[in-house]
Every structure is written in structure tokens, then in C-alpha cells.
Image (cartoon, rainbow, N blue to C red):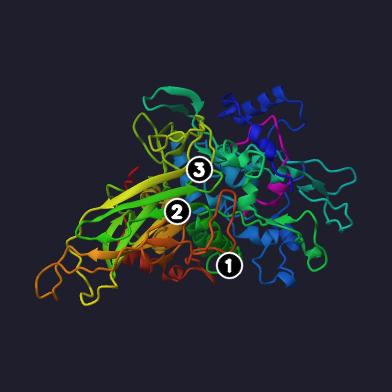
Amino acid sequence: MQHDQSDHRWRRGRAWRGLTPAGLGLLAALTSTSAHAVPTEPETLVNPLVETVACELCHGYSNPVADMDDPPYSPFQTWQGSLMANSARDPVFWAGVAVADADAPGETELCVRCHAPRAFLDGHGDVTAVDQLTLDEQSGVECELCHRAVEDIAVPPGNAMYTIDDVLEPGGTNVPRRGPWDYTDGVPEPPHDWMFDSYIGTSRMCGTCHDVTTEAERVDDDGVGLGVPFNEQRTYTEWLRSDFAMPGAGFSSCQDCHMPAIPDMPGCQAHVNQFTHATGGRSHDLVGANRFMVELLQAEYGSAGANQVADFFFDNTLAAMDAFVTSAATLEVVGPAEVDLEQGLPGIAVTVTNNTGHKLPTGYSEGRVMWIEVLADYAGQRVYSSGAWDQASGQIEQDAQLRTYEGIAERYADGLNFHLLFNDHWVVDSRIPPLGLTPDLETDPVGDRYALLPNGTWPNFDQHSYDFGPDMMVTDATPGDTTDDELVVTVRLQYVINTTEYVEFLANNAGPAGSHVDTLFDLAGGAPPVTLAEQTLTIPIIGFGAVSSTDSGGAPTTTDSGVADSTATTAGVTSLPGGTASDASGSTTGPGQLPGDEGCSCRTTGGAPAWWGLGLVLLWGRRRRRSALVSAA
């Protein structure tokens, strides 16, 4: 596949952002002689998109016999359970649309254009609820939307301004499917028209939807207009301004991470066990970190729900997510060689490195927060903590040392949050930049968290240290043994994509769609965090602050386990003695690399989640989560 190494030169003029489709089309017509200088408008396709079920017939095969033990890699099987395939079913999306429609009636077409493109193209861009879609319109970001997309240099990426090929080839019977294939090498051609086009393999293609601009003028911290529309999402531009977009050994496109290459594997049923293709293929898992939403979608649309999507597809996506999320970041943790609890636990130094090609986290910021969780335990007893997660309440422990990574936007005039179309001011953007991100108003962090490096780029890492004071409550659990006392310090990088605060906001402001989301989340026990990285330090305890009840002398009981070395390692979960930690896989993950079969232990397999069958009994029997989450920067 040809990569988009030329994308690093693409810089969008600010005057183009925030224009209406009509205005953008006029500008494109004035600046280009391209035959496709206007994004495709509703009800203009002479040859409508072919339904995805037609693609499944050939592209939904099982692995060949020789590869039966490998994860599924047929395009349809890996796509069907993804959030791309289910973007038009996402209940949180529709709750957000309900809020936006109440704030600005008739202004949500952009949302539909991106999440339900078939509905937009069919002239149904004014829908505001999932039950207003036809079954075909629920296909989300589907096969032909991408495989008929045409690169339009005159149209900047963003806001779902896609151009769809609608021209039959001479003598053809259908619009060619575009892709990085070449059937001139003797391999039998597919039963539909095709066209070699490397555009589908470029990050600019992904940027069609993964940069989002609203019409509100962005203002600074004093409320002064900056002369640009509000940069609601900049995932593509973050990549474009990073080292990942630069030609060379470090180049990595969106597809390299989210659609990893599957070399020399067949792409359709006709080639299974017969032919492989020299140009290879790509996995269509298209996974990110929103694992909980896939579980909710499986409960609603899988075998235990509407039975529209086979559980197998969702299970495959969940497994792919588990393997994928551990590649996002690396944790380095250094702790003291020993600890005297009477003196406290100083010097837990944590470095979080962003391995992705965009900010971590990126994309839609409302209700999303990543943070460092630090837990120190002895003999089954919690001694110290920062940012401890409580699943029952859906809350993060609020303490002075809490370190979070998030983007918080507001309407400057009154500080109103969670109203996407009203946002005009970034209160804070503490998300970790990608490697080599160059300064620019569109992608700069907001706040004083980061400082430019000597080479003029933003750091792709964050360093934070923890100091815990004396603990006078813990006693020696084994006063007769001076060799077994250890403090186990677990550090996790956690990520919640829909906080309790945001779900409650939707419940109170999004009408039936918000109530539906609130019910789904309550039935599931709330959204659990995704662990992106984890490391454990085991530190010998040489002194206790509390008096052991078994010590007849009444003096503090101490142990003397000697001094052990403490070193930093990459993210992992394997505990070693002496204040050290080990990567569970025995390897590190650097920028642009993906691990093999690494994953967390939270994978769900089989049918729908067990909680679904409990129904409303669990909803009424469970104490509602109604305390607000206030994230510290």
C-alpha cells in the first residue's frame, strides 16, 4: 500500500474552516479545475451506495485453513463489530445530537453527515434520533463510502466533506471500488469493477471526518476573538504536525496503527485457499479505546438484543481492542529502594509517554478523561492512593496529587459545558501531544502543563511525582518475620470515555435519548475505565509507624529486609522484588509500533454481557450515581 508521506506538506488555510458546504463548494470551484471540486451533496448520486450485505457475500469469509488459529482478517468480519460500522447506532452520539438540536435547531446535519453518511446522502440529514433511520442507514461508515471516495485537493479535510465517485468506467456495470490493489498480475479479477487508488490508504482520507470545526468563533482566555472558528476536534491535524507524518523511518499513517497490514492474504471469498495477492491487505478492525460502547452495542444489537449484528463480530472487535490499547502509551515508574512508613513514601516518579500519532486522548473531548491511578497496598490493606477509581460511584478519587489528561471546552460568556455547538473557549487541554508536534494555534496544548522542548516541538510525555506522608495506622502483619514486609505500588494509566458527570448531563438534557443512555449505563454498572498501561513496584518496608498489638514492649515493630535496587521500566504488570517493575510482555512499544498479542484481562467473550439479563430489576435496586466528578488538572 502506498503511504501518504506527502500529507506532511498539507496545511489548511484558516479561512476555509467553518464555511458552510455551499460556501466551501464555491471556494473549491474558484481555486481548482478538478472535476470533483464540490463535496457530494444529498440526493445527487446517480449510482447510490451498494448495501453492505452485498459486500459481505464475498468479503465475509473465514480464515483459510492454514491461518485458522490467527485472528479473523476478512474485511467484513473485522469491520462489522467496529464503532465505524456502528457509528449510526451509538446511543451516546444520538444523545449528543439531541442536545445540539435543542441548542441550535436544524444545525446537526454535520453530525449525521459523519456518523450516518448513507442517511445524509439519501437526503435524511435532518434526522435527530436513531429510530428515524432505515435499517440500511444504520450501517454507519460503510464499505462504499470509503471505497468510492475521491481525493479532492480543493476541499480541505474535515467536517465530513467527502466526495463520492459516481462515474461508471467505459463498458462498466458499476462504479469501480477503489483501493490499493492491482489485478494485472494474473490473479483473477473481482466480480465488480475496480480501480487502483492509493488515496484510501492515506491519513488525509481519515482526516475527512477526524477534524471537526464548529461555526463559533474561538476566543482566548480574556474572551477576545481569535479570528478562527472553534477547533472542536483536530485528530488529523495533530498527526499532520507530528513526526509521524514526516517521510522516513518514523513515518506512520493512521492506517498503519488502526488498520495494520496483513501481507499476502486474500481479500475475498474467491481467493481463500486459492490465491494470495502480492499487494497484501489491511485489517478492518478500526479499533480505538471505546471498549464499553462496543459492549453496550452488543447488548442492544447482538443476539440478546435486536439481533442485527452477530455476537461474533462484536467479540472480534473486543479482542482486537484488548490487544490494541496497550500500544497507546508507555509508563515509566521509579520508586525508592525501601520505605519506612513512619517517615512516608516519597519519590514515586511517573513518566507517561504518548506512543500514538495524535494527542492522548484525542477526538471528541466531552466527558472524556485519562488519569494516573496510584495504589499502594500492604498485606491486603490500602496504605496510600491517588486517583483511585471507584466503580460503584463512577468517580475518581479527588486528591491534591491527582494527574489528569483532558480537554475541557466551554461557552466563554457563561462557562456552560457539554454543549458542543456553543463551545468557543478551551479552558484547558492537558492531553499529551504526539511526538514532534510543532506549535500551532489549532493543536497547541492549553494551560501551563507543557513547555516547548529545545528543538521547538511539544513533548510527547508528561512527568509527575508523588509524595505520600507518614502512615501511623499500619502495623506489621507478621512481626515474627523480618523478611516478608513489602509495599506493593501499582500505577495505572486509566481512561474513561463517558464520565458519570457526562452521562448525568445527557440524562437531564437530551430527552428520551439521554434517558436511554442513562439506563444503559446503570444496567451495566457504569462505564469502567480502560487500562492503557500498568506497572507494579514492590518496595521493601523497613519500618512501621503503628504499634503492633503483638509487641509486648509497645515499641513500633520494624523489619530489616535490607536495601534493594529500584529502576524504571516500560508499562507492564509483573511485580519484581526490590522496588522494580517489569514489562509483562518483556518488550517496549515505541512510536508507530504495535504489539503482537498483548492485551488486558478485561476481555468479554461469548454472548451479551451477563448484566443485560437482569433488566430493570437491577436499575431499581441499585443506588443511583449522582455525585459530580470534578477533574483536577
Provide residue 258's location: percent of width, then percent of height: 61, 52
CB atoms of marks 3 and 1 within 8 Å: no
Residue at the spot x=54%, y=51% of the render?
Answer: 130
Front in this rendered view, residue 554 or 205: 554
Q: Label the magenta part by its dominant secondary structure.
A: loop
**Badge 2 or badge 1: first in the primary sequence:** 1
Q: Residue at x 27, y 60 (%)?
A: 339
* Residue 198, disc: none
Q: Count residues near mark 3 (Cα–Cα under 10 Å), then give few for <14, some for 14-19, many for 20+.
A: many
The residue most toward the front is: 562
Drawn side of residue 419 relative to residue 207, left or right? left
Q: Residues within 10 Å of mark 1 (few under 14, many from 20)?
A: many
Query: What span is colored magenta in the figure?
Result: 139-159
Q: Is residue 465 visible?
A: yes
Inspect the image, locate mark 2, and give the three-letter code of the amino acid beneath it: Leu
Residue 121, quarter of picture? top right
Q: Position of residue 611 (x, y in %)?
A: 43, 69
In reply to whether residue 155 is colored magenta, the answer given is yes
| Above or below: residue 431 compared with residue 387 | above
- Mark 3 or mark 1: name the one nearer the start of the chain: 1
Across and down, in percent, residue 395 comes to 33, 55
Q: Which mark is residue 331?
A: 2
Query: Is residue 100 within the magenta segment?
Result: no
SS category of the residue bearing label 2: strand
Any mark on residue 359, and which? 3
Single out the mark in the foreground, 3 or 2: 2
Residue 311, label in figure = 1
Mark 2 vs mark 1: in front: 2
Q: CA distance from mark 3 to mark 1?
A: 32 Å
Q: How many marks?
A: 3
26, 203: nearer the viewer: 203
Please name the residue shown 23% across and 75% down the image.
478
